[in-house]
Image: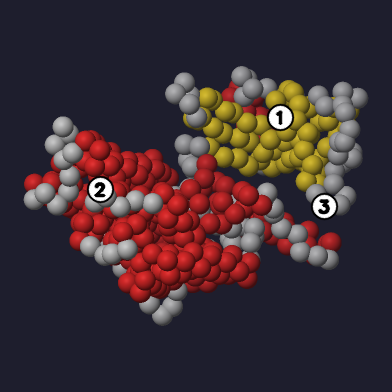
Amino acid sequence: MSQPAMREILAEAQRRTAEHPFAVLVWVDEAGYPMHRPGPFEVEEDGIRLRISDEPLPPDGAPVAVILSRIRPRPQGGYGGRRYWTFHGSAHRRADGVAVRPHRVSGWREDEQPFLALCEGAVPQAQRYFAFLSRIHGRPIRPRLPLVGLLLRATRAPFLTATVIPVLLGAAVAFYEGSFSSPWLVLTLAAAALVHLGLNVCNDIFDALSGADAVNPSPTPFSGGSRVIQYGLLGIREMALLCAALYGGGALLGLLMVIFRAGVPLLVLGALGLLLSIAYTAPPLRLAYRGLGELAVGLGFGPLMTIGAYMVQTGRIGWPPLIASVPVALLIALVLYVNEVPDRAGDAAAGKRTLAVRLSGRWRARIYGIGVAAAYLFVGIAVILRWMPPWAVAVGVTLPMAVSVGRSLARFAEQPYALIPAMATQIRLHLYAGLLLTASYLVSRWLGPGGS
């Protein structure tokens, strides 16, 4: 880059970072590990002087980078207008610090590229770096997380609300009918949670083997998998062992409930749920790859779990938990549907023909609207027909959340990161609606159907 052009960029960077006049000096030490030192800086005619005197510092003439950043906090929280510049050059030791005369500059602007996309784009470079360290040290070196954090990420445990709601709902229906045991409820929650976590890990394994997660250009906190395989945190074999342990633990707890509570019908129901969770992404059925993911999730986290929890409490099967599960099943299927929209490009490239991939842009928001309308209308009809307690109409207070998600789908279907708030809202919608529906059965038991 010409010196006049570099001077112009340096001057702009100095102006933009006036409210935060600090820089970070970065270099690689003799062992191949990255080093960094922060400190105040000032722009000289052709370079940058950092006033850092304490060791360690790069040796004179070593290749270095200087990172300048602009971060503007928003009054309502978070940040906006983030930007950084990375100036590449050689270190020149001075008595009061280090001077760098850059010959190349790179950078990032938040208004041109979302921060999450920036991070994801750096993954291949990080993988090459860890491969380099592994070669020079003669042993595998990979990124690490604390064990608890790694397990939470690998299993995607924060999504367990999808399990908690149908189990609580099934137990609430049983309570409404006069049957309830808190120890068996805890055991049911534990068994269902283990199977759900096993499903999440299984899903990651087969999406990694198919390449769906690897080619996903825009993963989000709610979609694109846990990324532990793509980031090198865990391998396929380790994930398979974790998956087997989770499924095995869930199956053992399920057998206890079969033996001591509900017998063969619960065994059939549990086996169906377990097979459905594996078939979600595993060959040969690969339901999610055939556009049947929403159906599988709706059945598994709707009727199967709700009826199963009811059977553990009562020892029998019945229609009431099936009816109660319908709106919950629709709303959790819509959680998956909304989360699939940002993954369309990667899923299509890997041959994963989800419902979001199959539908045109016009129909993506319409299908969501149809699903939401069906959930709320079902509650209304069920209350009118006395299939549900009158208190169930309280679910209607969550309708504005559904409207918000629908509008976001219509507006941001082609902007994956702009859909993150909508994905979070849909998860809360399922949670709040499920809790309100559960509460309606409890209140009706305590106060009576009419509230008197």
Q: Amino acid at mark 3?
A: Gly
Q: Are marks 1 and 3 in contact (CB under 8 Å)?
A: no
Please state which amino acid type lies under the numbered disc 2.
Tyr
- Determine which residue is flagged by label 2: 176
Left or right relative to 445: residue 131: right
- Residue at x 46% of width, y 60% of height: 191
Where residue 243 sits, quadrant-wise, is bottom right
> In the figure, 275 relative to 318: above or below?
below
Quarter of the image where one finds residue 318:
bottom left
Most foreground residue, 361 or 309: 309
What's under tag 1, amino acid-wise?
Answer: Ala
Relative side of 107 to 346, left or right? right
Where's residue 104, x and y in %? 69, 42
* Cα–Cα span, label 1 and label 3: 22 Å
Tell me the element at label 3.
loop
Rendered image: mark on residue 32: 3
